Image: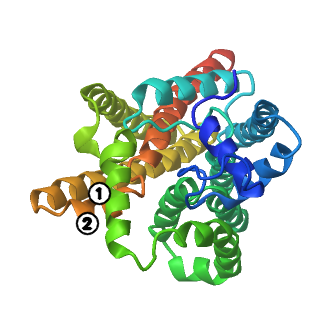
């Protein structure tokens, strides 16, 4: 039932943004807004409808968009349609129980509920090698939620940079890269405007409150519960096993000259590589946390850790090992019907 997690915060903030007479003087509602598109989208109907109704309208929109994105992603990975809901359910369970820092991609209505479908659309187009669409779709994810779209887009960008023939690819794709950047700035500029300000001491204090008190379960690994550390370790172990399985199956399919099956494992390999890049972001967050605090500089740590270094791995890691497992299942099912 509405409101779910965060809806009580973000929907009231959207209503307040359009109507200053709604809950005047509230510290959170009058704080800087980093999700301009979502606030605009929710704020307009909030002037005429109850917030519960706005929540359900937003859920219908974001869930429908997510369903379309998942269909596109499943098709790009060549997952049979009858298995696609099971793959989605397994991914959901992986996020629900295997997360490290409290991230989710399927839930109530807020900015990231729209950003994640664009991430899926973008990765689906990456698998199809339609790079012009990739950059625009990931730019749209950034526009809706700069942190969600930013980490996902950065991981795809790093993967793209590591592929051969960079200069020819850049020569062909730079207009689309520019277009995607332009779309992303719709979200980045309003968010970035809240990071500065003349009161530097106040900004440092705010970042430390954000990281060490308000959102410790998202941002500061030293303050994560032991349960979450064990869950993350379990997810990482499964990812290691899935990576080995993916590489082994690809070699087997190439050896047996099963081109279609090998091609599918190559696609899965790309998802695995994206997941390991996401793990790299989390490792970087761990290093920042450990080094800065050991040096007695929690101010530096907080100003960096507030960018959610652990968010994308909570989503990408379960996604990767889920598609490995179900790809193996789907190919086994196909082999039963066609052993040759």
Is residue 151 rendered to the left or right of residue 24?
left
Classify 94 as above or below 271: above
| Residue carrying label 2 | 300
Picture quarter containing residue 49?
A: top right
Classify 67 as above or below 271: above
Q: Residue at x 68, y 60 (%)?
A: 36
Classify 202 as above or below 44: below
Residue 7 appears anywhere in the view:
yes
So how many labels did they put on this image?
2
Residue 284: mark? 1
Residue 141: mark? none
Picture quarter containing residue 149?
A: bottom right
Residue 15 in the image, given as x and y percentages of width and height: 74, 48
Q: Residue at x 71, y 65 (%)?
A: 136
Which of 293/274 is in front? Answer: 293
Residue 255 appears anywhere in the view:
no
Q: Are marks 2 and 1 in contact (CB under 8 Å)?
A: no
Q: Residue at x 51, y 50 (%)?
A: 270
Q: Nearer the viewer, mark 2 or mark 1?
A: 2
Which of 259/36 is in front? Answer: 36
Question: Looking at the image, what colour scheme do you see?
Answer: rainbow
**Of helix, strand and loop, which one carries label 1?**
helix
């Amino acid at each position: 039932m509405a409101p779910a997690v965060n809806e009580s915060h973000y929907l009231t903030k959207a209503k307040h943004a359009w109507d200053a007479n709604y809950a005047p003087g509230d510290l959170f509602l009058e704080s800087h807004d980093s999700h301009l598109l979502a606030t605009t989208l929710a704020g307009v109907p909030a002037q005429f409808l109850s917030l519960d109704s706005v929540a359900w309208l937003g859920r219908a929109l974001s869930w429908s968009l997510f369903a379309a994105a998942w269909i596109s992603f499943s098709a790009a990975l060549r997952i049979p349609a009858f298995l696609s809901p099971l793959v989605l359910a397994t991914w959901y369970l992986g996020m629900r129980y295997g997360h490290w820092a409290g991230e989710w991609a399927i839930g109530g209505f807020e900015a990231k509920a729209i950003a994640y479908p664009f991430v899926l659309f973008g990765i689906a187009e990456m698998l199809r090698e339609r790079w012009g669409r990739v950059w625009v779709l990931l730019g749209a994810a950034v526009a809706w939620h700069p942190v969600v779209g930013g980490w996902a887009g950065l991981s795809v960008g790093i993967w793209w940079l590591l592929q051969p023939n960079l200069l020819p690819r850049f020569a062909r794709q730079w207009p689309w890269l520019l277009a995607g950047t332009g779309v992303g700035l719709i979200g980045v500029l309003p968010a970035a405007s809240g990071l500065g300000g003349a009161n530097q001491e106040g900004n440092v204090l705010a970042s430390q409150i954000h990281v060490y008190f308000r959102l410790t379960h998202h941002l500061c690994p030293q303050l994560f519960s032991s349960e979450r550390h064990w869950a993350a370790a379990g997810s990482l172990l499964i990812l290691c096993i899935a990576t080995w399985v993916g590489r082994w199956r690809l070699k087997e399919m190439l050896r047996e000259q099963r081109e279609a099956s090998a091609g599918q494992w190559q696609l899965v390999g790309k998802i695995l590589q994206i997941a390991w890049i996401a793990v790299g972001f989390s490792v970087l967050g761990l290093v920042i946390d450990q080094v800065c605090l050991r040096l007695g500089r929690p101010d530096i740590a907080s100003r960096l850790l507030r960018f959610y270094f652990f968010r994308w791995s909570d989503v990408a890691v379960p996604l990767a090992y889920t598609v490995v497992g179900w790809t193996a299942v789907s190919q086994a099912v196909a082999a039963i019907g066609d052993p040759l």
